């Protein structure tokens, strides 16, 4: 566990009579990725903008690593990478210049700026565009540069607002891969998204918000389990070799397993009673069965069911 | 806490002075590569070329009466016009564009104070504007030297240049103020165009001419010192002209008063405008939300 934290304390934001956030309390801590879910107008972007000092709360406070963003923005954001909405970059600058500007603002030492820029530009697969002007780039390319700017300098905390917005399927996949890599590199990532499959694939935890209020927060498995009708959770298991009916039958026999459904030859979903501990036990049993488990994650369809269940009242 | 070799520690974020310079550097790059810079450069060169042609072809007697008269006719009006154009071109949407075009989203979410962004962009706009003004001034001096020689360059022209720089500083403060006031670039630019090109002049004429009140609160009144310093003698602070009716009746005629700011008054007006607008604009930008 590391000390990276993001904390919203009684955070409220009102626009005239419209309440965008209502006493939001949320503390995110450690090295993980938290998906921030909610329908349009729920308050996701408002929350992220308060954390990045783009807007001010009506009341309450936002802390990054224990530092109040609005009292000491420079210190609070010193090791934070942000991508809010789809920023535009000065069109006459090249990608290298735009990233150099951010590097200088962030205080990345001159001796490593060139190397850092090269590293992030390679990561977003835009190396051949490094010295091209931003105005000649497509929306997707610009978004890759935005992502490069957000991860420039290896920030400890990364705040992303729909990072795959505007990207083609390949770009989306690459960005997801980047975020997964960052997660492994000891970062705290807070990411809003409308893509449940994306959240399910990348994130460890999920926070659900609507009408400015936090409705659920916790590990995906737990949240899914909590909001399912029968208290069950669902995981998607990927294996190296195709599994036969006999193996699926054996899995059905494991304690706590409700049902097993084949998705394709090498993937199946398992519905379990209970929460994250039961899922951990299931994983342990599956590994012992030596069926070549290579993937074990909350099922995106289960997250979707949960989402629809939580937000059923929302238009 | 995770070690982060690219940051070293969190105290390595540069001070606001350095970050202001960073903003100046990249905003200036953006300005000089933009189409508007070249458009303004072409306008400056075109105005200079037209004046060169007019002076060379018609040789107006009044303008060629003395070097001072030449510089006054050339620079007095057109120099001010170039300043206003530069302020509108580089300041009109400098801040509103950060909201409307969402370029602010790329910068504001980083560890930088908004004041560093504002001042950095203002300095960049000033540098770009001075570059345009320098081109126009060089064309003026080139013509002056051609007709009167280098020794014919009057010291009053140097004074006028300095006042022009001060007016540029002040006018950019004003355009940045309106740019910070509106999120729409079109509204911000239109407001500054209407104010600087029409409203201030009109109000100045009405207030001074008809109400007989010195328009000390209008920036363009203070900027008159740019042209006035090139006149010999310096215009009288107040002149009133009476107009009688066509029938020759002496009573009930119209009296028009003209005020001319003295040099200390002009400098004070321009400095106060700069100080008030730059602070007010900065406060507005600090409070404005990226919604």
Image (tube, helix red, strand yellow):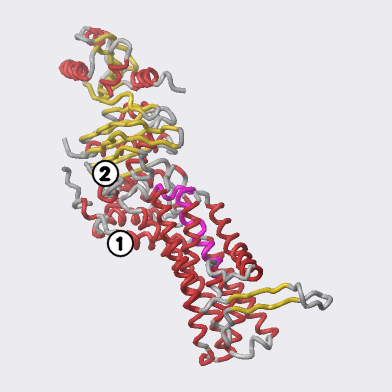
Residue B196 drawn above or below residue B245: above
Give neighbour class at mark 1: few <14, some 14-19, many 20+ (Cα, 10 Å).
some
User: In what quadrant of the picture does the N terminus of chain A appear?
Assistant: top left
Q: Position of residue A152 (x, y in %)?
A: 30, 48
Give neighbour class at mark 2: few <14, some 14-19, many 20+ (Cα, 10 Å).
some
The secondary structure that dominates the magenta segment is helix
The lab-note entry on whether marks 2 and 1 share a chain reads no
- Numbered circle sitting on residue A124: none
Q: In front here: B136 or A248? A: B136
B106 within the magenta span: no
Q: Position of residue B147 (x, y in %)?
A: 59, 89
Mark 1, residue position: B18
**Whether label 2 touches label 1, CB < 8 Å:** no
Q: In front here: A282 or B237? A: B237
Q: Which residues are magenta?
A: B81-105
Is A299 placed left or right of B43 in the picture? left
Residue at (56% x, 66% y) in the render: B85
- Numbered circle sitting on residue A68: 2
In terms of image quadrants, where is residue B141? bottom right
Q: Chain of mark 1?
A: B
Q: Position of residue A289 (x, y in %)?
A: 17, 15
């Amino acid at each position: 566990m590391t000390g990276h934290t993001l904390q919203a304390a009684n955070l409220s934001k009102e626009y005239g009579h419209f309440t965008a956030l209502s006493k939001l309390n949320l503390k995110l801590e450690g090295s993980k990725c938290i998906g921030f879910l909610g329908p349009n107008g729920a308050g996701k972007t408002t929350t992220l903008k308060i954390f990045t000092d783009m807007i001010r709360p009506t009341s309450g406070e936002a802390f990054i690593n224990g530092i109040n963003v609005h009292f000491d923005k420079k210190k609070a954001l010193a090791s934070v990478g942000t991508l809010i909405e789809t920023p535009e970059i000065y069109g006459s600058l090249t990608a290298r210049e735009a990233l150099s500007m951010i590097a200088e603002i962030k205080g990345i030492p001159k001796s490593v700026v060139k190397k850092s820029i090269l590293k992030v530009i390679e990561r977003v697969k835009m190396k051949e565009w490094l010295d091209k002007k931003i105005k000649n780039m497509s929306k997707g390319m610009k978004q890759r540069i935005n992502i490069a700017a957000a991860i420039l300098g290896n920030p400890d905390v990364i705040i992303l607002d729909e990072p795959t917005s505007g990207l083609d399927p390949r770009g989306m996949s690459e960005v997801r891969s980047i975020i997964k890599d960052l997660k492994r590199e000891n970062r705290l990532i807070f990411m809003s998204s409308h893509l449940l499959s994306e959240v399910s694939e990348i994130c460890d935890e999920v926070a659900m918000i609507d009408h400015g209020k936090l409705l659920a927060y916790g590990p995906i498995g737990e949240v899914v389990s909590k909001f399912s009708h029968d208290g069950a959770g669902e995981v998607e298991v990927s294996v190296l070799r195709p599994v036969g009916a006999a193996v699926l039958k054996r899995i059905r026999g494991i304690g706590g397993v409700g049902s097993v459904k084949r998705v394709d030859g090498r993937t199946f979903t398992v519905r379990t009673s209970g929460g994250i501990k039961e899922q951990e036990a299931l994983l342990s049993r599956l590994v012992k069965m030596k069926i070549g488990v290579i993937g074990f994650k909350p099922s995106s369809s289960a997250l979707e069911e949960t989402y629809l269940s939580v937000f059923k009242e929302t238009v | 806490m995770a070690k982060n070799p690219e940051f070293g520690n969190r105290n390595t974020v540069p001070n606001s002075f350095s970050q202001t310079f960073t903003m100046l550097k990249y905003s200036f790059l953006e300005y000089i590569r933009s189409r508007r810079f070249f458009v303004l450069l072409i306008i400056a060169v075109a105005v200079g070329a037209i004046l060169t042609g007019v002076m060379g072809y018609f040789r107006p007697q009044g303008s060629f009466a003395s070097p001072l008269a030449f510089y006054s006719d050339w620079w007095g009006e057109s120099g001010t016009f170039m300043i206003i154009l530069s302020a509108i071109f580089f300041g009109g949407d400098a801040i509103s564009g950060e909201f409307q075009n969402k370029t602010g989203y790329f910068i504001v979410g980083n560890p930088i104070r908004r004041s560093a962004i504002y001042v950095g962009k203002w300095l960049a706009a000033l540098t770009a504007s001075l570059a345009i003004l320098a081109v126009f001034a060089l064309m003026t001096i080139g013509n002056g030297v051609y007709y009167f020689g280098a020794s014919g360059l009057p010291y009053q022209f140097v004074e006028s240049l300095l006042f022009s720089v001060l007016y540029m500083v002040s006018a950019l403060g004003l355009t940045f103020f309106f740019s910070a006031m509106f999120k729409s670039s079109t509204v911000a630019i239109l407001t500054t165009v209407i104010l600087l090109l029409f409203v201030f002049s009109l109000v100045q004429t009405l207030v001074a001419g008809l109400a007989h009140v010195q328009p000390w609160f209008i920036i363009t009144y203070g900027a008159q010192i740019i042209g006035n310093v090139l006149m010999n003698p310096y215009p009288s602070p107040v002149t009133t002209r009476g107009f009688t009716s066509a029938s020759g009746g002496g009573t009930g005629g119209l009296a028009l008063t003209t005020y001319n700011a003295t040099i200390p008054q002009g400098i004070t007006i321009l400095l106060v405008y700069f100080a008030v607008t730059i602070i007010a604009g900065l406060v507005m930008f600090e409070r404005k939300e990226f919604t």
